[in-house]
Amino acid sequence: MYKLLTWEQVQEMLDYGIEFGSHTCTHPELPSLSREQCIEEITRSRQDLEAKLRREVVSFCYPRGKLNPEVIQLVEQAGYRGAVVTPKRSRIPLNPYTLRRVGIYQQTTPSVFRLKLTPLMRKNYERFKWLLGA
């Protein structure tokens, strides 16, 4: 189970320049929702964060990396400037709303962290993800 940040910790991280993006309210698999439910998850999470953080939220991350062209369009229409997905999804073109990211988790050791950031590992992630604990 993940240990959540407190709002005080979030504020401290904001003060150091860390950006917080939206990730929906209930962490659903967006393609399985109705269009209306999807819009609610995408927009309400942003509104809630902006109210709490008192700053604009410009980025989005797809829960569990689940997306499709309609979901991508809804994220763009909601006014986000970009979105990230992990891992790489086939048949989804790379653009500002499908930026690839590297997953870093509680069990990621410093040496695995450094390894995940190397160009060779990023390029061959699917081949080596067993080695990276993904």
Image (cartoon, rainbow, N blue to C red):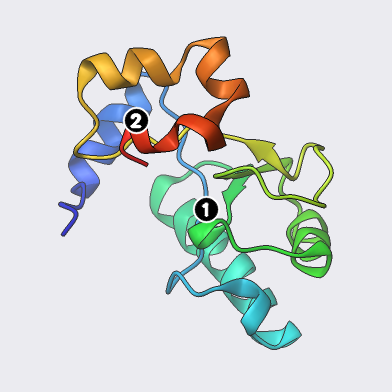
Q: Nearer the viewer, residue 92 or 37?
A: 92
Q: Which mark is residue 131?
A: 2
Q: Give the foreground label among 1 and 2.
A: 2
Instruction: Note whether 70 is above or below 23 in the view shown.
Output: below
Q: Nearer the viewer, residue 25 or 98?
A: 98
Disc 1 or 2, which lies upstream in sequence? 1
50 to the left or right of 79: left
Picture quadrant where residue 1 is located: bottom left
Residue 103 pos. (x, y %): 42, 37
Q: Which mark is residue 22?
A: 1
132 to the left or right of 108: right
Q: Which amino acid type corresponds to the residue marked 1 in the rendered image?
A: Ser
Q: Residues within 10 Å of mark 2 (few under 14, many from 20)?
A: few
Are the residues tagged 1 and 2 within 8 Å (C-beta)? no
Identify the residue at image location x=60%, y=63%: 66
Instruction: Note whether 62 is above or below 70 in the view shown.
Output: above
Marks 1/2: CA–CA distance:
29 Å
